[in-house]
Amino acid sequence: MSTPSNPLAQHTLAELRQRRSIKWRGYPDDVLPLWVAEMDTSPAEPIREALAGALARGDLGYSTRAGVPEAFAAFAEKRYGWAVDPGQVWLTPNVMLGVAEVLRHVTEPGDGVVINPPVYPPFFHYIPDSGRRIVESPLTCVDGCWQIDIERLERDFAAGAKAYLLCNPQNPTGVAYSRETLMAIAELADRYNIRVLVDEIHAPLTYAETRHIPFRSLDVPAARRAVVFHSASKAWNLAGLTAALIVGEDLPIAENFTDAVGHLGVFATEAAFLHGLPWLESLVDGLDANRKLLAELLPETIGYTMPSATYLAWLDCSRLGLADPAAVFLERGRVAFSGGAAFGSGSHVRLNLATSPEILTEGVRRLRNALTAG
């Protein structure tokens, strides 16, 4: 199989503006959208073929598990060296609905669930919507490097929390946690009887210097009790097809919980995990070039540490003295980033790197214009 060309360089801005997804319809046409986690790619060829086959067969009914657990197990072994039992894989429409369902089974109403801001904004909504209580254990940042404060985490575990919702690789900072950090978390979880849930949706998107370590691959009791969440949606740009995975032992997942999983999402997910690795590797090469290009383009007044995973850049705008940097960039520069306040840090913005080098360059040009326009 030939190696695909850069998937990020296949569409012009005019072509992308014809899309009807939220990224391209959330703002007026004069705004350049570099915000929500959608990629400016076309589907990988194996995914395109799987979907075309379903359409040709008229196969648009209700979903089944099909071969997704087995496909994911094969991918996990190849990509991470992680042996997954397909019998321990369930489907969910998306990761956060899966998190809410698992919390309902492994905690009680009112229980504390620890999270590490800045973090994916739905964490702040789904936990209280599930009747559980958020316990914030903020990340620390030293010289631009974001890490879990293990001492603070222990205090928050000891104070009576019952579960820990970890994001690894981390959204929005792009950190992929080391084995040492994950083992420290596992040791604390065992000591304080904390149930660990891990959002690993960005796991396929790690760069050459990094290797994703699945939490359940650790040989410790807390890891064996953990529940992790995966999906092809981020790495292969399939969010609209509503299919994700829950991996864990002895979970009493309700039989009707999977009713809302997209049937086309099942086909696309299976094709991605079985046949999408060459495309993924080309994508990561393109993202690698973009994360380095961004470092060259940004003004020195904005702090930026290249992510070790994900296609997200977490930009420190604290030196600009702006109450809402994202709003200023939008109003003065007509470029949209995700505002940091939703993640837990209003002095930051999140930039989506998953676009062409030309669009990324234009986005930073607009950012610079916003700074001089004031």
Image (cartoon, grey):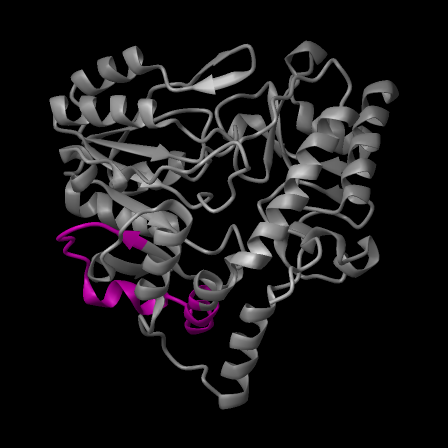
The residue range painted magenta reads: 246-270
Q: Is residue 365 left or right of residue 285?
A: right
Residue 251 part of the magenta segment: yes
Quadrant the N terminus occupies: bottom right
Residue at 31% across / 47% down in the picture?
A: 82
Residue 104 part of the magenta segment: no
Residue at 19% across / 21% down in the picture?
A: 188
Q: Indicate the quadrant where residue 138 lies.
A: top left
Residue 86: give x, y in percent of width and height. Answer: 25, 61
Residue 78: give x, y in percent of width and height. Answer: 39, 53
Residue 118: give x, y in percent of width and height. Answer: 47, 25
Above/below status of 174 relative to 80: above
Above/below status of 259 relative to 373: below
Q: Nearer the viewer, residue 212 or 246?
A: 212
Above/below status of 158 relative to 287: above
Give the residue furthest to the front.
1
Q: Is residue 232 left or right of residue 93?
A: right
Quadrant the C terminus occupies: top right
Q: Nearer the viewer, residue 5 or 314?
A: 5
